[in-house]
C-alpha cells in the first residue's frame, strides 16, 4: 500500500474532509473503493456549496422573465444527494450492513408481533 493512500485528495472542503477522516481511520479501501470515497467526499462538498448558495439567494429566485422560480440548485442538490447515497452504497461499509440488518430484524419482530396480537418490542 502506498503511504499517500491515507492522505486525503487535495481540495476537499470541511465536510468532505471530515467524511474522509471518519472512514479512512478505521478502514482500508481497495483502489476502486478509494475512488468511490473520493467522489463521495467531493459530492458532500458540492452539496454544501450549493446549499449555501440557496441560503444566500433564497429558495425562490427570479427567472429569466422575472417570474418566481425554485432555485435551480435545489434540484441539483437532490441529484447530488442521490449520487452520494449510490457512492456510499458502493463502498459496502460495515455500518450500513449492520444498520440494514437491524432494520430488517426490527421490522420482522414488529410483523410477527402484529400477526400474533402482541405489542412490538
Image (cartoon, grey):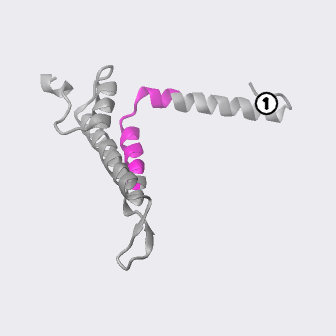
Mark 1 crowdedness (10 Å alpha carbons): few <14, some 14-19, many ≥20: some
* Main secondary structure of the magenta stretch: helix
Q: Quadrant of residue 92?
A: top left
65 and 114: which is toward the camera: 65
Which residue range is magenta in the image? 79-98
Rendered view: 51 above or below 97 = below
102 and 53: which is toward the camera: 53
Q: Mark 1 points at which residue?
A: 113
Q: Is residue 54 left or right of residue 96?
A: left
Considering the image in quadrants, where does the C terminus appear? top right
Q: Is residue 69 magenta?
A: no
Rendered view: 84 above or below 16 = below
- Where residue 41 sits in the image (x, y, percent)? 30, 39
The residue lying at 38 percent from left, 45 percent from top is 84
Number of numbered tags placed on the structure image? 1
Residue at the extreme bottom: 65
Q: Does the magenta stretch include residue 86?
A: yes
- Where residue 11 sits in the image (x, y, percent)? 18, 39
Q: In this view, does 119 lie to the left or right of 5?
A: right
- Where residue 68 sits in the image (x, y, percent)? 45, 71
Amino acid at each position: 500500500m502506498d503511504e499517500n493512500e491515507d492522505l486525503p485528495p487535495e481540495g476537499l472542503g470541511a465536510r468532505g474532509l471530515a467524511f474522509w477522516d471518519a472512514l479512512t481511520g478505521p478502514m482500508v479501501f481497495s483502489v476502486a473503493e478509494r475512488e468511490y470515497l473520493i467522489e463521495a467526499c467531493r459530492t458532500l462538498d458540492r452539496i454544501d456549496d450549493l446549499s449555501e448558495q440557496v441560503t444566500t439567494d433564497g429558495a425562490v429566485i427570479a427567472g429569466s422573465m422575472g417570474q418566481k422560480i425554485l432555485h435551480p440548485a435545489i434540484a441539483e442538490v437532490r441529484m447530488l444527494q442521490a449520487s452520494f447515497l449510490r457512492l456510499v452504497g458502493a463502498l459496502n461499509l460495515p455500518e450500513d450492513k449492520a444498520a440494514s440488518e437491524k432494520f430488517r430484524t426490527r421490522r420482522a419482530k414488529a410483523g410477527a408481533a402484529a400477526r400474533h396480537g402482541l405489542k412490538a418490542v
